[in-house]
Amino acid sequence: MRDTPDKLNPDWPALLKRITLELGALGADEKAWLRERLFAIAATQVELDELFHKADGLDACAGCDGACCGCGRHHVTLTNLLAYLLADETPPTPDFSRTCPYLGERGCLLTVDRRPYNCITFFCETLEDQLGADECERLRSLDRRLRNEYLRVAARYPAASLRGLWIALQRFGDGALLQSTGKDMIE
Ligand code: SF4
Ligand code: SF4
């Protein structure tokens, strides 16, 4: 029997429709602000992915069968889904029976530029050992820059908290997820 939808196992089509409608109702200035943040996030994530490749991440992760994705259930944030929706694309459908709802048969279903902050910045010891001192420093710097952008989105739209969307849904219930606070927290 299928589980009854709840906040940790939400009715995905209904949630997607809800976020899409709220996003469509945002004013032009809010959308422009959000687009700028999402653009910066995507660009930084692509840079982090370059470091991941330098660290031979593809081979290493295949070798340990993507072990850390077993702890990824709460990593996706509203920000990651907004990146799809603002580009008029449909985010991949989550499967809540998996350890992470975005873990597909052949790895992560989310594109590198729209992958959660916790995932794209995680370089385990095996990966870090492959990087030189300068590259490790670059990793820290990109991480700080990226975190700051995610926190800016979360300050403006608290449902985009880095604690993850499924937890935010518990807090916000059926209330608005994209009610702007007007804040722009810049470090
Ligand atoms: S980041 Fe490290 S722990 Fe995670 S899947 Fe890759 S090699 Fe394994
Ligand atoms: S979102 Fe993707 S990278 Fe992150 S834990 Fe889930 S499957 Fe792994």
Image (cartoon, helix red, strand yellow):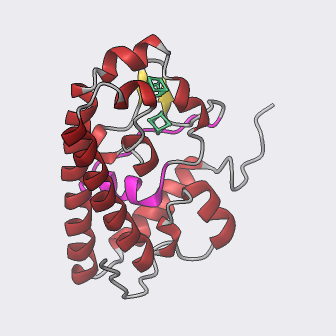
Instruction: Return the x and y of residue 105 as percentages of the image width and height.
Output: 48, 18
The magenta region covers 76-96
Q: Residue furthest front?
A: 133
Q: Which quadrant would residue 130 be assigned to in this image? A: top left
Instruction: Return the x and y of residue 68 as percentages of the image width and height.
Output: 53, 30
Is residue 85 located in the magenta-colored stretch of the structure? yes
Front position in the image: 76 or 51: 51
Q: Residue furthest top?
A: 63
The residue at the point 42 percent across, 67 percent down is: 21
Q: Is residue 49 visible?
A: yes
Front position in the image: 161 or 53: 53
The residue at the point 42 percent across, 48 percent down is: 116
Is residue 23 located in the magenta-colored stretch of the structure? no
The residue at the point 52 percent across, 48 percent down is: 75
Left/right of residue 102 with respect to residue 143 in the rendered view: right
Q: Quadrant of the N terminus?
A: top right
Front position in the image: 10 or 113: 113
Instruction: Return the x and y of residue 177 as percentages of the image width and height.
Output: 51, 72
